[in-house]
Amino acid sequence: MVSFTPTRDLSLSRMIDNVKGLKQFAARLARFDGAYLRFVGDIEVSHRRGGHVIETHKDEAIWELMYFGHARGE
């Protein structure tokens, strides 16, 4: 099992902000809402067997997410 708890944002880049003119107009018309997100947080990885935790590791980690769908309910 892997769990990640974000503690702060490192980066938020909306892809539509990087295009201009007709491409940006078309992207807005299509309601494109892609983004690149990067977070810092605490990660925990647990190995389980038969319902029992055999091994667990915890540390700080960076999580990156590239999203191409509709993230907002506009």
Image: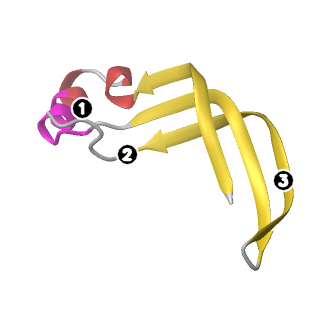
- Residue 45 percent across, percent down from the top left: 76, 52
Of labels 1 and 2, earlier in sequence is 1
Crowd class of label 3 (few under 14; some 14 to 19; many from 20; radius 10 Å):
few
Q: Residue at x 84, y 48 (%)?
A: 57
Other residues around mark 1 within 10 Å, as few (<14) / some (14–19) / many (≥20) = few
Of 23 and 2, nearer the camera is 2
Q: Secondary structure at mark 2?
A: loop
Q: Is residue 58 left or right of residue 63?
A: right
> Image quarter for residue 24?
top left
User: Where residue 65 sits: x, y (%)?
Assistant: 53, 40
Q: Which is more foreground, mark 3 or mark 1? A: 3
Q: CA distance from mark 1 to mark 2?
A: 16 Å
Magenta stretch holds residue 30: yes
Disc 3 residue type? Thr
Residue at the disc numbered 3: 56
Chief secondary structure of the magenta span? helix
User: Which residue is nearer to you in this view: 35 or 16?
Assistant: 35
* Residue carrying label 2: 68
Q: Residue at x 30, y 39 (%)?
A: 71
SS state under label 1: helix
Residue 2 horizontal side relative to residue 46, left or right: left
* Spatial separation of the CA atoms under disc 2 and disc 3: 33 Å
Q: Give the x, y percent position of residue 33.
A: 29, 36
Amino acid type for the residue under numbered disc 2 = Phe
Q: Which residues are magenta?
A: 25-32
Figure colour scheme: secondary structure
Mark 2, other Cα within 10 Å: few <14 / some 14–19 / many ≥20: few
Q: Quadrant of the N terminus?
A: bottom right
Q: Is 1 placed above or below 3 here?
A: below
Mark closest to the chain's N terminus, 2 or 3: 3
Q: Are marks 2 and 3 in contact (CB under 8 Å)?
A: no
